[in-house]
Amino acid sequence: MAVLGAGSWGTVFAKIAADAAARSEREGGAGWSVTLWGRDPKVIEHLRATGVNDRYFPTVRLPANLGYEADARRALEGADVVVLAIPAQALREQLTALADAVPADAVLVSLAKGLERGTGLRMSEVIAQAIPGAAGRTAVVSGPNLAREIIQEQPTASVVAAASAEVAGKVSRICATDYFRPYTSADVVGVEIGGLVKNVIALCVGMCEGRDLGDNSKASIMTRGLAETSRLALALGGRHETMAGLAGMGDLVATCSSPLSRNHTAGRLLGTGLSEAEVSARMTQTAEGIKSAPVVLELAREHGVEMPIVEGVVAVLSGAVSVDQLQPMLLRRKLKAETPHVS
Ligand SMILES: NC(=O)c1ccc[n+]([C@@H]2O[C@H](COP(=O)([O-])OP(=O)(O)OC[C@H]3O[C@@H](n4cnc5c(N)ncnc54)[C@H](O)[C@@H]3O)[C@@H](O)[C@H]2O)c1
Ligand SMILES: O=P(O)(O)OC[C@H](O)CO
């Protein structure tokens, strides 16, 4: 198994898969090898020598059964599972360059939570275009999965979504550990939309915090954020129950509540009055919501879906409105029902 991308989540997911292999072997089952590839050879060299990813988790020694490779093609040799932990806007370019090295029957696992700029495509759709024939063997992993908690083996659950039950089952087995519990799902669209839109909603909740607003405001944004996320997911063919699950409400709550979330942090900085350019310059890790927000809005408009919170976040990011103007922008809209009366 190869994990491409040695950032925060790639490193943690590689640890999960290596720990899952060790558990399977301890229980008398099959084991598997896990190789982590990163594009910076110095990081890989250091990982090989110490088992520590200094940039992200300087105090954590990764499992001894995890391998490291600076050459992506070598990492891919013979891999039956290829995990993609590369940020959304870089995935197509990286995958296209390596497409001929991905084994023909390998299962592809998408970890990124974003929409591609320029195409509006979800990551599973980008993978299907970059690797012809991959659609039936692609899975998406998403849920309340803050890497900095999981590296400490704090228990969490997640969702593995794939069109094929067999593929979802295989991927869930290779990431099941005593601290990471995956559930399978048939709803790829819903799981992807839940994971990527919550980043935009977390930007808005972060803005509330930057403005010293309290829990009522934040809970209102989260709840109405879930309502608009659900509208988009359903319009694209996703399922309602996914939105109430780990990849919907679960991830939304974790990301919007946690100071560990990069999107939440970016939103808080915006809330203190910094511009998008100033916030992006300060972020040392990927905050996918910043780049995905305008793409989410375009997709919503294409499908006639109303997403006022996303619209507000996009307006703040572009500098069209200030964070202070967001409040009247959202609260002065025409009144509507949360639960409509039936006549
Ligand atoms: N960190 C988390 O808690 C977490 C949890 C779940 C999902 N995710 C998602 O995982 C994806 C990756 O996030 P992350 O947290 O690892 O980000 P990160 O910023 O920590 O790391 C991204 C890594 O990708 C590498 N990278 C960037 N462009 C690349 C390219 N063209 N080719 C190869 N590598 C490239 C960077 O060098 C870096 O190592 C994002 O879509 C994010 O939303 C993150
Ligand atoms: O740090 P964030 O905001 O990218 O969120 C990380 C994960 O997606 C939480 O599930």
Image (spheres, rainbow, N blue to C red):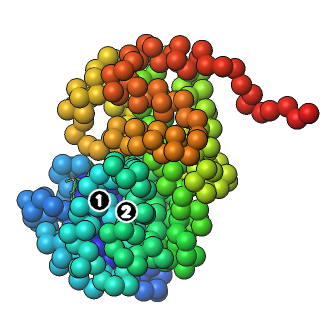
Mark 1 and mark 2 in contact? Answer it, CB < 8 Å. Answer: yes
Mark 2 burial class by Cα count in 10 Å: few <14, some 14-19, many 20+: many
**Residue drawn at 32 percent across, 16 percent down:** 273
Quadrant including the C terminus: top right
Quadrant including the N terminus: bottom left
Left or right: where does residue 228 sit relative to residue 95? right
**Residue drawn at 43 percent across, 56 percent down:** 122
Report x, y in % for residue 89. Answer: 29, 51
Q: Amino acid at mark 1?
A: Leu
Residue 214 vs residue 90, the one in the foreground = 90
Report x, y in % for residue 19. Answer: 38, 69
Q: Which residue is mark 2?
A: 126
Element under disc 1: helix
Left or right: where does residue 118 sit relative to residue 47? right
Does 180 sit above or below residue 212? below
Element under disc 2: helix
Give how far apart the Cα atoms at labels 1 and 2 are.
8 Å
Which quadrant contains ligand 2? Answer: top left
Does 28 sit above or below residue 117? below
State whether residue 318 appears in this view.
yes
State whether residue 61 appears in this view.
no
The residue at label 1 has a CB less than 8 Å from ligand 1: yes
